[in-house]
Image: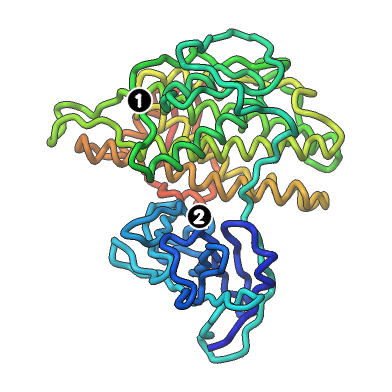
Amino acid sequence: MVVVRLGQLSDFTQARYVIHLSDKKRLVLFRLPVIEPSKKVDRAVNETDDGWAYYAMEAECPHAGGPMQDSQIDIEDSAYVASCPWHAYDFNVETGESSVGIKACTFPVDVRGEHVALLYNPEDGSEVSLVKLEPVSEKFKLKEHRGSKNKTTSPQQEVSPSHQIESGPAKYLDENATVCDWCAHILNTANPEHKIELTHHLFSILTEKEASSSPMPLGRGTVLPPAQPPREGLSEVQPWAIPKAGKGGTLKSRIAMLHALANIELWAIDLAVDICIRFATFQTNPDSPDGSRELPRAFFHDWLKVANDEAKHFSLLRARIEEMGSHFGALPVHHGLWESATITAHDLRARISIIALVHEARGLDVNPMTIDKFRRAGDTESVQSLEIIHNDEITHVTTGHRWLTWICQEEGTDPVHVFRNNVRKYFRGYIKEPFNAEARAQAGLDGRYYQNLEGIPLA
């Protein structure tokens, strides 16, 4: 057994870190509140005096290699469980045991004294050292002094502005607001800084209350979403009128590329929020073998997790554009993504197929090429943000695949057949190569979904 010092205890402030070891192995370190504090005399070796517990496990899910640093952490039977973001396989972070029968490798952590020490057993018995300890990005780049939780409004006071300009802090709903109340409020919020702040707040209070005796009410069918979310201070043009961004070789070109991506991420927030409220009353086909079923609460959690990620992505891109000397809104934008949402507003199966499994999956294909352009230009700061976005987007496609598969399982249909039929009905043009087959497969999409597939013929 090798003892690998990870750093001074006082330096650990985030919930999770990726450990890079000299034998090329990657682990994830979790820093979580102690569930049931021990008496000081017999405190566990991975527990600190101030109430934190440290756990380490392999960074790749043993099922399909999903990034466990992005896992969802829950408490089950007085133990922490990490659920892989790709296929929701769950693992006890201390024992590695799973409800699905496979086991993840876990490693003891000792925090007695002033250092965090990993107890590691190398495969060949050689010496192993720490190469890098990488904090996992959890923070939004919000602008200072934007919001105020002290200013609240009840859902009954909510208005639906068309293109009303917002000023002052973001408006928070009161404690009686439902998930759908919040979704409508976010969709009707035109100021992008307010939108990302409120989206992050909604996901935070939803997850906080979910483990309590009083989970947040969903409010299915009690409030309607807007036909199209308003925008503030943006010059909107048709998609074909957007100036070409270039190949990333100049600062101007890279700003244009990031600006276009930021616009996509802003619409992606609304798309993930909209799917929760617009389809809140969805029920599977009543002719299904087991009758109709409503969407479980996990559906709302999963899509608001996507919305929270998209808000983070927008905040990273907006901040980077400003660091490069420009600002979001300096260039024209389009709302082509929302047109796909309008076309699929009548059917959840179609919405997931087109938005998550066509548009989001296409991002998996082009993201590595975009990242390579920025890397060749020496823009490492942008590369870091774009890599965070790419890794998150794999989990978003996974979310779409998971819920389309759930619906099809309930209805006794084939998700590949349902997806391809929806593309032929509601997507204009070909599903074009090149495909990032590896990333698509990680998200659950094999070639049966997208190869030799054409939507509505282009005029």
Q: Mark 1 = which residue?
A: 280
Viewer-proximal residue, 420 or 210? Answer: 210
Pointer 1 or 2: first along the chain: 1
Q: Secondary structure at mark 2?
A: helix
Give percent across and percent down for residue 241: 71, 18
- Report the residue at 76% width, 24% height from top: 243
**Residue 268 shows in this picture:** no
96 in relation to 437, above or below: below
364 in relation to 411, above or below: below
- Mark 2 crowd level (few <14, some 14–19, many ≥20, 10 Å Cα): few
Q: Is residue 371 left or right of residue 428?
A: right
Q: Nearer the viewer, mark 1 or mark 2?
A: 1
Tag 2: residue type? Glu
Tag 1: residue type? Ala
Q: Which mark is residue 191?
A: none
- Mark 1 crowd level (few <14, some 14–19, many ≥20, 10 Å Cα): many
**Residue 238 shows in this picture:** yes
- Report the residue at 50% width, 27% height from top: 271
Give percent across and percent down for residue 145: 73, 30
Q: Which mark is residue 438?
A: 2
Give percent across and percent down for residue 130: 66, 76
Give the CA separation, mark 1 to mark 2: 33 Å
Residue extending furthest toward the bottom? 125
Q: Is residue 165 left or right of residue 408?
A: right
- Report the residue at 77% width, 32% height from top: 256
Viewer-proximal residue, 311 or 177? Answer: 177
Give percent across and percent down for residue 377: 82, 49
